[in-house]
Image (spheres, rainbow, N blue to C red):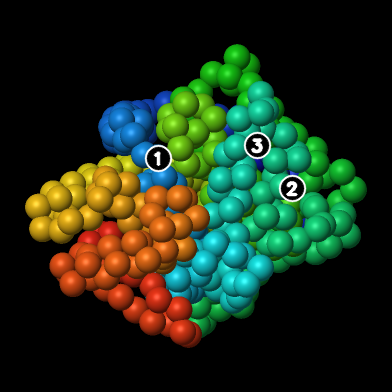
Amino acid sequence: MSDQAWINPDRNQPWNTLPPLPIPKEHYRNVKVLEQLGEAKASLARLHGRSAAIPDQKLLINTISLQEAKASSQIENIFTTDDELYQAFSQNDLQETYGAPKEVLRYREALWKGFHSLEQKEVFDLDYFIQMYREVKEAKDGFRPAFTRIVIRQGGSGMNAGQVIYTPPRGEGILEEKLSNLLDFMNDDQQYALDPLLKMAIGHYQFEAIHPFRDGNGRTGRLFNIHYLTKKGLLDLPILFLSRYIIDHKDEYYYLLAGVSQRSNWQDWILYMLQAVQSTANLTYRKINDILQAKEGILQAVRQQTPIQRPEQMIEMLFTQPYSTVKHFTSENIYAENTARSYLNQLTELGVLDKRTIQGHHYYLNIDLYNILSE
């Protein structure tokens, strides 16, 4: 496949000639890419080892993944405050959650439902993509109809704002054909023997170029990134805070995506994704360490300065999410209602928690956890 084949000849017309994978090897078999690949793999391996050693995985499931959901949604201009999000999450009722917090929590639901569904599957398939899209968008449809025209326009407010920068492929059976090729490339490690991080970077571009859904493609594609890393054993849990890097380098993200279709610049795109993995693996690693240190420090203070019984269980629960309620402890049969309320108030007096009353309900904010996640 020549480099010229990867250049879209007319961004105003559907790119039905989007080439199948794999891409030419010279785009990733060079010193620059291989050096960055080595650094990304080292950082990811360190995170993998650290997270695997944590006894209570809820600490990661309910904190790091919630931040990933928030960041991934923010890329699509879905904004919520940490307070709104954590309060909604603590209620544990998606049906009673509305607006941006619900969109974020739906992404988190998709993150975990996809992870668990893949435990029962040998490979990724077309149903996986549809399932993730439906979870993210709370939708019942699937791939966009063959006649549906989607165009991607330049954002912002500059002189080129609103101009068409890309038109994804469309037509009878075209989306399914191109997605099937993508799945063959990602699933088949015999025919396409390539490092998983390189495959993730290449596969993410291809999915975004195919753009198979009427909406939610960005979030579905980012779910695919993390699920692919867990499926290949590079992480035990989908906790990589990958969207944080994209938020911080959003303009570059879209510029480099366009760089593949406009200039066949695969190398810079791959380098960007590898740098994203390295940076966010290091960030996630630091957050996990900070959370564990804060947890241990608070546990020691509770043991020394309060009469709280079973403090280990109390602190474990307080570090599974930033906002806690009395119900969290009673529903898990940790304490009776009056005991839980008394202990939470004691920790508020100690300065560990901040008691807040919102719409007549009492919430207890874990100050240290909240600050670490917000950094």
**Distance (Cα) linking label 3 and label 1:** 18 Å
Identify the residue at image location x=19%, y=50%.
299
Q: Where is the C terminus found, in terms of image quarters?
A: bottom left
**Distance (Cα) linking label 2 and label 3:** 13 Å
| Disc on the earlier residue, 1 or 2 | 1
Mark number, residue 357:
none
In this rendered view, identify the residue nearer to me: 327 or 164. Answer: 327
Q: Quadrant of residue 163?
A: bottom right
Three-letter amino acid code of the residue under disc 3: Ser
Position of residue 298 measured from the top left corner of the image (x, y, whole percent): 17, 54
Position of residue 286 measured from the top left corner of the image (x, y, whole percent): 23, 47
Q: Which class describes the residues within 10 Å of circle 1: few (<14), some (14-19), or many (20+)?
A: few
Position of residue 335 measured from the top left corner of the image (x, y, whole percent): 38, 55
Query: Which mark is nearer the camera, 1 or 2?
Result: 1
Q: Secondary structure at mark 1?
A: loop
Q: Is residue 375 above or below residue 313?
A: below
**294 lies left or right of 315:** left
Query: Which mark is nearer the camera, 2 or 3?
Result: 3
Task: Name the residue beneath numbered marker 1.
Answer: 57
Q: Which class describes the residues within 10 Å of circle 2: few (<14), some (14-19), or many (20+)?
A: some
Identify the residue at image location x=79%, y=52%.
143
Identify the residue at image location x=46%, y=84%.
360
Can residue 17 be spotted in the picture?
yes
Q: Secondary structure at mark 3?
A: helix
Task: Name the residue beneath numbered marker 2.
Answer: 130
In this rendered view, identify the residue nearer to me: 173 or 374. Answer: 374
In this rendered view, identify the residue nearer to me: 215 or 3. Answer: 215
**Distance (Cα) linking label 1 and label 2:** 28 Å
Identify the residue at image location x=45%, y=79%.
361
Query: Which mark is nearer the camera, 3 or 1?
Result: 1
Three-letter amino acid code of the residue under disc 2: Ile
Task: Name the residue beneath numbered marker 3.
Answer: 117
